[in-house]
Each structure stands twice: as C-alpha cells, then as structure tokens.
Image: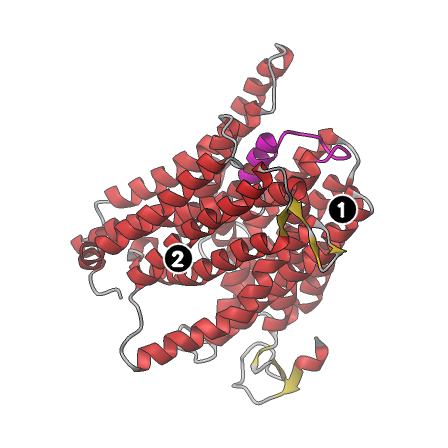
C-alpha cells in the first residue's frame, strides 16, 4: 500500500501533511487498512460460522439452531454499535476505543480457534463486543481527517474507506473459508485472529497520522455519572449471574436460555429507542414529523435486512446440503459464495453513482422513497428466485451454483438502492438533539431484522422451506409496494428532506 502514497501539497495542520493517500490525508491509509483487516477477520469467520455449526466435524447442530445462533450474533454486533459509540464519546475517545476493540476481536477469534465447544460461544461474544466498539468509532475518525462536512475530499474519502471494507470482505471467504473448510475449522478461525492482529498492529503504528481530535473524549463522564454507570452495570450483571446460576444448578439450562433473551432484546430495544425519541417533548413539530417518516424507513429496512442477512445463513446452509458447488467441473468451498456480494458491490457501486449523476443532470433521478422501496422489493424478488433451487432440491437434484449467484446479484442491487439511501436519510432526518446517535439507530434496523430471523428459527420455523421463503418474499415486495403507494404521505412527513 506504500506505493499508493504520493507527495502532495495540503494545507498546514492537516494530518499527514507530507504525504497523501490517493489524494487524501495520510491517516486514511491507517484507517483503510485497519478496517480492511477487521472486515477480513469478521467476514472470514462469518462465512465459516453456519457451516461449522452444522458440520459433523464441527458442532453438529440442526440448521434451525445454527441459523438462530448466526442471526443472534449478527444482531448483537449491530446492537452493540450504540454502546460502542457511547464509549467513544464518553469514556475512551475514538482512538483508544478502536485499539481496545481490535484487541477484543482478536482475543475472540483466538477463543474460537480453541477446539472446545464450551469456549466457542464466549469467543462469539467477544467478537460481537469488539465489533460493536470498533464499528461506531472508526468512521468517526475518518470524518475527523477532513476540515468539516464541506471539505470537498470528504465524500471521496469515505468511498475509499468503503473499498477497504469490501476488499477485506471479498478476500476473507476465499482464504479463511478455504482453510477452514478444507484443512481445519479452528485453523480458519485462527487466521481470522491473525488478520485482526495485523490490523491492530498497523493501526498502532499509524496512529501518528490521525487527527489529534481522535484521542479526545468529546463528552467525558463526570465522577457522579461514572459512579452511577458502574452501579447500574454491576446491578444488571449481578442479576444475570444469579439468574443463570439458578437455572444452571437446577439442571434446566439449555442454549435457548441465552438465545431467547438476546433475540427478544434485539427486537425490544430498537422499538424502545424509536419510541423514546418520538415521545421526546424537546422535538419541534418538524422534527416530530420527520421521525414519523423515518419509522417507515426503519421498519422497511428491518424487513430488508431480515432477508438479506440470510444470505450468510439460510442460503449458505442450503448450498452446503443441496447445491452443486462447482463451475465447469471445478468444485469450490461453500464459503466462497460470501465473496460474491463484495465483488459485486465493488463492480456496481461506481456504475450506480454514475447513473444517479446522469439522471440528476436531466432532472430524472428517482426520489429517496422510490430507491428505498425498489431495494425492498428486489430483496423480495431474490427470495422468489430462491424458490427455484428449493424446488430443484425437493425433486432430489442438486441446484446449480448459478442460481445462488443470481440470488446474491439481485440482493446486491437491492442493497445498493436501499443502504446508501438509508444512511443518507438517517443523517438528514435526524433531530438536532439526536444527531450523533441516529447512525446507531440505523444499525438497530439490522438488529431488529436479524433478531426476527433468530426468533423464527428458535420457534422451529424451517427457513429453507418453500412456504416460509415465499411468505418472506411476499412480505418484502408488499412492504416495498406499500411505501411506494404512500410515497406522497411519507414525502409530506419528510418536510424539506428529499
């Protein structure tokens, strides 16, 4: 990556004023590589996770239990992004929080690499905690490299940073997935730990290029707040320890004693957060109206992610048991399907950006609502497409790999329509009082969607059956159509946001 650094003239005081990274502050290279390695470890482990859970040489669980565990894990990662942002704002500052988070993630992967089922769930918990801490704070540091929101390089900087995410996500299943499936599951998890270790090392070596503001705690806790927070944390931890001790010693403990509370929290907390903001009397009429519109987008996004994230669980487990995972007679590991989305994102994102600019010049760019509803309908279409390989498998045949690639393609197009718009509309419609918290609220839509999948799996619903797949597909298409039908009402609630 050093070859990408060139001499350039930037204004004095800009971090890394001697060199630039593709025309951006030198600190972007540090954050780019940190995020790339973190995503490498995250997506590599995620590609292996459902396969390891169902494999006879792994934990040998049922498909339903594996999907529940996978969904709960994903929901926790996004749920913990809010307290992760809080830690960066109130306790450690973004830079220290990211460094600690990387260490926690690496420890989690090392724990997963141990050949004991008893430590496996602890390792998942550590990776989820570390990911939550890192996710909310590393993007903050990218923004701090630029001189405010009007810096012309800012949007381009986030685009370069986003490429780091997808490079890591693309390479991880090809390397970690291959080693995990073909050599040893735990060696695959150890490779994820190595990747995060490389990310932490280069982050610590490159911190001198970051903006000094990244070490500052923006709103440090007062002594009274610190004491109150510790008391509440100790109280809830004590209640959990006592409750699980009673369940354990009474001989009634099962995995559902962990999964059910976590999935319920994944549904309840997003509802509580939205309700608290909506009921806040400090919001003026315009802000209240925008929040009413935002709830439409939030619910739609939860449905989208509920289906989309099954690409790593339901579809992966189906591919493992019922797909012909080969191209022109050449067999490939099931985990490689998880590289399809990031490579398509890298290929299609510039195309979509060009299309929107071209349409905008002609005054024909689709509105936020049209893009959002189209993305939601497309994820529904992807599951209607899933019905074909399911029918082939029901007939006793193996489904062709191209069916699955086609499903991932449709889902990726849907993501490119919905996800960037969702991020944008979240920042535009955020009440001033909650401006710094609303990105965490957007992540809660992912939490709610994945937690719903987890609840369905725990309830015994077979997500690889034709009926439930058709029902989910119909739900997404109908929800997308409903938003489009009521677009004028939602537009009126959005006020000046377009």
Residue in view at x 34 percent, y 53 percent: 434
* Quadrant holding the C terminus: bottom left
Does 70 lie within the magenta span? yes
Magenta region, residue range: 55-71
Q: Is residue 165 above or below residue 480?
A: below
For disc 2, the neighbor class at 10 Å (few under 14, some 14 to 19, many from 20) is many
- The reply to whether dot 1 and dot 2 touch (C-beta < 8 Å) is no
**Within the image, what quadrant is residue 57 found in?**
top right
Does 340 lie within the magenta span? no
**Is residue 211 in view from this perspective?**
no
- Residue 375 is tagged as 2
Question: Is residue 189 or residue 431 the one in the foreground?
Answer: 189
Q: How many marks?
A: 2
Percent x, y of residue 29: 63, 72
The residue that disc 1 covers is 181
**Within the image, what quadrant is residue 113 found in?**
top right
Taking the view exactly as shown, the residue that stands out farthest to the right is: 183
Question: Is residue 289 or residue 418 the one in the foreground?
Answer: 418
Residue in view at x 40 percent, y 59 percent: 418
């Amino acid at each position: 990556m050093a070859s990408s650094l060139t001499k350039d003239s930037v204004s004095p005081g800009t971090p890394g004023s001697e060199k630039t990274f593709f025309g951006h502050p030198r600190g972007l290279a540090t954050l780019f590589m940190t995020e790339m390695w973190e995503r490498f470890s995250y997506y590599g482990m995620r590609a292996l996770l459902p396969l390891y859970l169902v494999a006879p040489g792994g934990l040998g669980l049922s498909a339903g239990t594996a999907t529940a565990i996978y969904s709960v894990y994903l929901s926790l990662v996004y749920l913990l992004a809010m307290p992760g942002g809080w830690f960066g704002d109130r306790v450690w500052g973004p830079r220290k929080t990211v460094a600690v988070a990387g260490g926690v993630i690496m420890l989690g992967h090392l724990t997963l690499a141990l050949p004991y089922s008893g430590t496996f769930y602890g390792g998942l918990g550590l990776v989820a905690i570390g990911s939550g801490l890192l996710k909310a704070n590393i993007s903050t540091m990218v923004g701090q490299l630029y001189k405010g929101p009007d810096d012309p390089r800012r949007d381009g900087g986030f685009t370069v940073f986003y490429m780091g995410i997808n490079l890591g996500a693309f390479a991880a299943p090809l390397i970690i997935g291959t080693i995990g499936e073909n050599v040893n599951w735990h060696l695959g998890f150890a490779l994820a730990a190595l990747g995060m270790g490389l990310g932490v090392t280069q982050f610590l070596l490159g911190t001198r290029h970051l903006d000094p503001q990244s070490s500052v705690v923006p709103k440090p806790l007062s002594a009274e707040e610190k004491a109150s927070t510790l008391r509440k944390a100790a109280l809830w931890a004590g209640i959990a320890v006592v409750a699980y001790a009673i369940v354990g010693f009474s001989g009634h403990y099962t995995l559902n004693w962990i999964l059910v509370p976590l999935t319920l929290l994944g549904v309840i907390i997003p509802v509580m957060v939205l309700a608290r903001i909506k009921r806040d009397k400090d919001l003026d009429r315009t802000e209240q109206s925008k929040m009413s519109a935002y709830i439409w987008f939030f619910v739609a996004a939860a449905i989208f992610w509920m289906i989309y994230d099954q690409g790593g669980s339901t579809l992966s487990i189906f591919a493992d048991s019922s797909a012909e995972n080969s191209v022109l007679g050449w067999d490939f590991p099931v985990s490689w399907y998880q590289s399809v989305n990031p490579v398509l994102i890298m290929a299609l994102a510039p195309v979509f950006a060009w299309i929107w600019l071209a349409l905008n010049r002609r005054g024909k760019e689709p509105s936020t609502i049209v893009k959002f509803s189209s993305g939601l309908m497309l994820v529904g279409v992807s599951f209607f497409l899933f019905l074909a390989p399911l029918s082939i498998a029901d007939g006793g045949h193996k489904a062709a790999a191209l069916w699955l690639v086609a499903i991932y393609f449709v889902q990726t197009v849907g993501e490119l329509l919905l996800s960037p718009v969702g991020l944008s509309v979240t920042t535009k419609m955020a009440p001033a009082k909650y401006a710094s918290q609303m990105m965490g609220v957007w992540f809660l839509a992912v939490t709610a969607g994945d937690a719903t999948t987890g609840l369905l799996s725990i309830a015994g619903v077979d997500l690889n059956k034709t009926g439930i797949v058709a029902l989910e597909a119909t739900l997404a298409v109908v929800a997308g159509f409903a938003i489009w039908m009521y677009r004028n009402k939602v537009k009126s609630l959005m006020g000046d946001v377009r």
